[in-house]
Amino acid sequence: MTSSMEPQGRFTAWYPGDHPTNPKLLRKSITGAGIPGTWCTPGSIDDIPDSKGAYVVLLRLDEPVEIALPGRAQQVFPPALYAYAGSARGPGGIRARVRRHFRSSKKLHWHIDRLTTRAAEITALAVPGGHECELIGRLLNRPGFHIVLKGFGSSDCRRCDSHLLTVARAAGN
Ligand SMILES: [Zn+2]
């Protein structure tokens, strides 16, 4: 087991009041990061391709969520916007994977399932042919994007500290 999963101190600096509540501005910021793709919501999931690639799931928590990952200390994820990057290279491609993320009821398998099942709002950007680590790199180059918790969502990745980011207000300005 890795011991690298530690809270990032700056994460609490803008909690609880100072987080963006306008997903449209955040979507603009993500698009501004030069990530080409198709946005979808649970109502428009059929619009996105079933090709292989990557995606960004954007979700909003309105209430704190306590998460206890196996063998780790419990962590509180405050109300905020979160961006998670993942890959979809299996059957059904990006559409099938994002459809699963959108389900609020499911067997918890990935770290991110603990957040998607509690999201007040959720959208996704499908990036056919994309790679999740490259997406994380591009987002971290934008103002306002921060790693939440080292190791979250990136157990199989040697390149990224995490595949989950939070977004501070600067990203929406
Ligand atoms: Zn990665």
Image (spheres, helix red, strand yellow):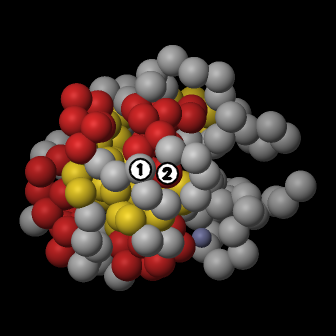
Give the mark nearest the N terminus, 2 or 1: 1
The residue sitting at 65% across, 28% down in the picture is 108
Looking at the image, is 117 positioned above or below residue 87? Answer: above
Query: Could you tell me the amino acid type at mark 2?
Result: Gly
Q: Which residue is mark 1?
A: 50
Residue at 28 percent of width and 37 percent of height: 46
Q: Judge by depth and name the residue closer to the eye, 29 or 19.
A: 29
* Residue 93: numbered disc: 2
> Element at badge 2?
helix
Q: How many marks?
A: 2
Circle 1: residue type: Asp
Given residues 26 and 71, the one toward you in this image is 26
Image quadrant where one finds the N terminus: bottom right
Indicate the position of residue 136 as horizontal and vertical percent values: 45, 71
How dense is the environment of label 2, judged by Cα within 10 Å: few (below 14), some, or many (20 and up)?
some
Q: Residue at x 29, y 48 (%)?
A: 48
Q: At which x and y percent is residue 25?
A: 12, 56
**Is residue 63 depicted above or below 165 in this figure?**
above
Are the residues flagged by discs 2 and 1 in contact, CB closer than 8 Å?
yes
Quadrant of res 156: bottom right
